[in-house]
Every structure is written in structure tokens, then in C-alpha cells.
Amino acid sequence: MILDAHVHLGEDVVFDEVNTEEELIQYYDEFQVDGGIIQPFIPRPYIKDHQDIHDRIAKFCKEQWPRKKFFGMASINPHFYPEDYYEEARRCVQDLGFVALKITSIAHACHPSSKDAYYVYEVCRDLKVPLMIHTGNGIPFADPTSVYQGAKDHPDVPVILAHAGSESFNQQARLLAKKLDNVFLEPSWCGTNAVKHMIEEVGCDKILFSSDNLDQIPVELAKYRQIIKNEDDLEKVMWKNTARIFNLKL
Ligand SMILES: [Zn+2]
């Protein structure tokens, strides 16, 4: 089994990216990936646009099940009024069955240890779902060190560092994952050597295969297959950690 912890659907108004349902089906079939966790590309900053893309993700997950095991991750602008943020997060988790929330520090212009980010942590705690936070490009907000205080103050909320700091900041991501039990690494876009160091320092229980970009799927798969020779460890990284951390009902 293979599950991708970081997949996008929709249109991104920050990075001008587009992924359609048809493309997702084509790529996940071609590379024999069994499913993953789908989050929105960044919509316009209106609650209606957030609701629409979340509904679209929920519909796609339902249509594909059980042929592909897709789950939803809500990505809501942390600067919305708290009551609006909470209601959309609650709707996604309790009504649509989503399994996590996301802060894209660079695109949401949200420092991951700011007051608004702390509110997101509280919502995650209340709804009992993990929080994925973008790290890497977009310094200083996306520096993994910026995640430290928030993750430390919410030890019961699992925090997944998307891109594990990317190439330039993976050292900081490794330090965080080593120091805090609730921090996990999602190393999409990191090179093989960076990932090798992650495995040596934090072990295979804290690392999650993910692509972020459809053309990146075969590259990411090859990366782990090259570095991890132990079959049990490979299974953990390819899907078991994702299933455990996001509490997936497979
Ligand atoms: Zn992404």
C-alpha cells in the first residue's frame, strides 16, 4: 500500500497552480499509489470559496472510495474571524470526515506561532485532528524554527512539517522532530541526502511519503526506495505512519 500525505486539488490564486480530479486519477493510477490526503490549493480569501473547494474534495473522496483511499484535509485562512474558522473546520471534520487542518504559512501569511496560529492549534485539539504546517520556502514564517513554540505548547496536537523545511532548512526541521515527540516530517522536495540524515536522526517512524505535486510522485517514490532498504521501514514511510498519525479508517 502507498498513501500520499500531501496532495492538492483545485486552483491556487497565490501560486497559479491547477489540479483537476481527472489529473489526480490519471497520476495515482499510473504510479500505483493507493490514495492520500487531499487539501485545497489556496482559494480566494472568502469563506464561500473555502467551503466550495472543501465540498469538491469531499465529493471526490466519496466518488473514488474504495477504489482509491483518499481523505480530506481542510485548509482555511487562519485570519478569518475565529467563529468562521471554527465552523468551517468543524464542518470539514465532523460532517465531511476530513482528517486534518493545514496552515500554509507562506500563502496564508501566518507565522506558525502567532496568535491566529495558536487558535488553529486549539481547534485541532478540540476536533482531535493533526495540524500540517508548510515549512521551507517563505522565510521567516516558513522557517521550521517558527513552528517550535506553537508545537511545544500543544504537545497533544500532532504537527506535520510539510516539506520538512525543504533543502535549505531541513536541519531545523530535523532538530524540531528530534526534540518534540509531536512533530513529524513530510520531506517532499528534499533531496536524498537530506532525507538520509532525517532517517538517521529521527528514524522511520516520523517520516511520511508525500508528493505535493503530481509530477513529483515518481521522484518521491524513487527517493525512499533508494535510501530505505529495510522493507518494514519502507512500509512505515510509504503509508503506515500516515495511517497512524492521521488516524485513517482504511
Ligand atoms: Zn502543498
Image: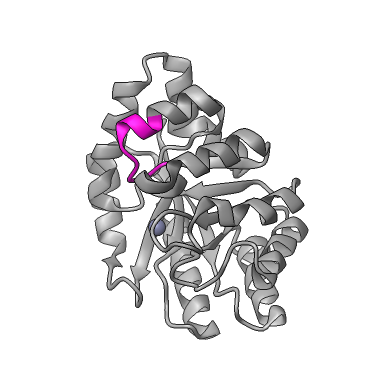
The answer to whether residue 65 of the structure is visible from this angle is no
The answer to whether residue 38 of the structure is visible from this angle is yes
Q: Quadrant of ligand 1?
A: bottom left
Tell me which segment is drawn in magenta. Answer: 187-195
Is 211 placed left or right of 53 in the picture?
Answer: left
Q: Is 107 situated above or below 223?
A: below
Q: Residue at x 47, y 33 (%)?
A: 239
Q: Residue at x 26, y 60 (%)?
A: 22
Picture coordinates of residue 214 (x, y %)? 27, 51
Q: Residue at x 70, y 60 (%)?
A: 121
Nearest to the observer: residue 232 or residue 104? 104
Is 9 placed left or right of 69 in the picture?
Answer: left
Picture coordinates of residue 16 (x, y %)? 28, 73
Magenta region includes residue 151: no
Q: Is 236 situated above or below 46?
A: above
Q: Quadrant of residue 38?
A: bottom left
Where, quadrant-wise, is the N terminus in this rendering? top left
Is 60 placed left or right of 214 in the picture?
Answer: right
Picture coordinates of residue 52 (x, y %)? 47, 77
Picture coordinates of residue 248 (x, y %)? 59, 43
Where, quadrant-wise, is the C terminus in this rendering? top right
Q: Quadrant of residue 221?
A: top left
